[in-house]
Each structure stands twice: as C-alpha cells, then as structure tokens.
Amino acid sequence: MTIHIQSISRAAVEDAVSQALRQSIGPRREYGYDEAAAILDVERRTLEAWVLGQQAPCLYKFLRLAAWLGPEFVNHVLRLAGLDGASRSGTAAAPDDLHLNKDVGRLICALGDALSDGHVDHLERPNVANRARHLHAELGDWLTQHDHTAARGK
C-alpha cells in the first residue's frame, strides 16, 4: 500500500481522530463528554471539538487519549499513515478481580441499553464491540495470570 504523504493533512488527521473518538465518547457511547473531559483533564469544549473533527489534539494529549482508549483508537488514527498493529506493552499488570467485574458489568449494561429497542443498530454496535474487545483482552490477561498462579499452587 502506497501512502501519499501529502494526503495526510490537518483535516484528514482531525477526521481520523474524530472517527476514532466517536467510537467511545459522546451521547449513547461508553463515556459522556463531561466524564471523558475529566479523565483527560481537558475542557469539555476542547473534547467536543476533537469528537466533531473541528480540531485535533496536540501530541501529549493524543498520547493521553492513546493510553486511555488503547490500541484500537491508536490504530484507527495511524491507518492514515499506513500503520497498524499498535498494542499495549506486555508490562501492564493483569486486571484485578474488581476491575474486571466492573468491565463485565459495563459491557452487560451497554448491551442491555443497545438492545432496549430490540436490536443493536449501526450507531450502537461500535460501542458494544469496543467494550467487548476491551473485555476480551482483559479476560485474556486475567486468565494468564490465574493460570500461572494455579500452576504454581500444584
């Protein structure tokens, strides 16, 4: 795949960031504007401008977003440059039981909300899918940790 560097414009970056953020932030998404702005330590109107594609975050704020939203967010934006395959480093600790329980509950709530009208529509599907992917990765880490613990106990 040939990438034309000139096609990576400010508008293209703003659009890629906007698309990636809309998966998780906004009305009927995993995080509302106020909650996300508080987590990221940015003003709500700044966050809204990113989500609406009116601005793109500077590098350090992009890195905050990347640390918080994870590889799926990063990969979506970096595809603009023909890059993919970002993943969390293997040094991260496996999730604890309460954190995992919270994320299972959030997935169930998101799925329940999406199914309240009888089906998961195209606007709801990305949110539910993102939560499921995140939980899948956490469950893998949790199982790896507990399989290792169980093997030591034998």
Image (tube, grey):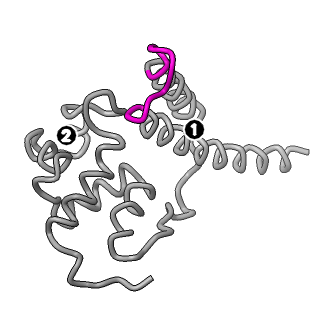
In the rendered structure, the answer to whether residue 47 lies left or right of residue 133 reads: left
Residue 120 within the segment the image draws in magenta: yes
Q: Nearer the viewer, residue 1 or 127?
A: 1
Give the magenta-colored segment's residue range: 114-124
What's the amino acid at mark 2? Ala
**Residue 37 bears which disc, if any?**
2
What's the amino acid at mark 1? Asp
Which residue is label 1 attached to?
A: 96
In the rendered structure, the answer to whether residue 141 lies left or right of residue 113 reads: right
Residue 84 within the segment the image draws in magenta: no
Magenta stretch, main secondary structure class: loop
Dot 2 lies on which element? helix
- Report how many numbered discs are placed on residues in the image: 2
Dot 1 lies on which element? loop
Q: Position of residue 89 (x, y in %)?
A: 51, 64
Residue occupying image coordinates x 29% and y 84%: 4
What is the crowding at mark 1: few (fewer than 14 residues within 10 Å), some, or many (at least 20)? few
20 versus 123 height, above or below: below
Q: Position of residue 93 (x, y in %)?
A: 55, 52
In the rendered structure, the answer to whether residue 141 lies left or right of residue 32 reads: right
The extreme right residue here reads 154
Q: Position of residue 13 (x, y in %)?
A: 22, 65
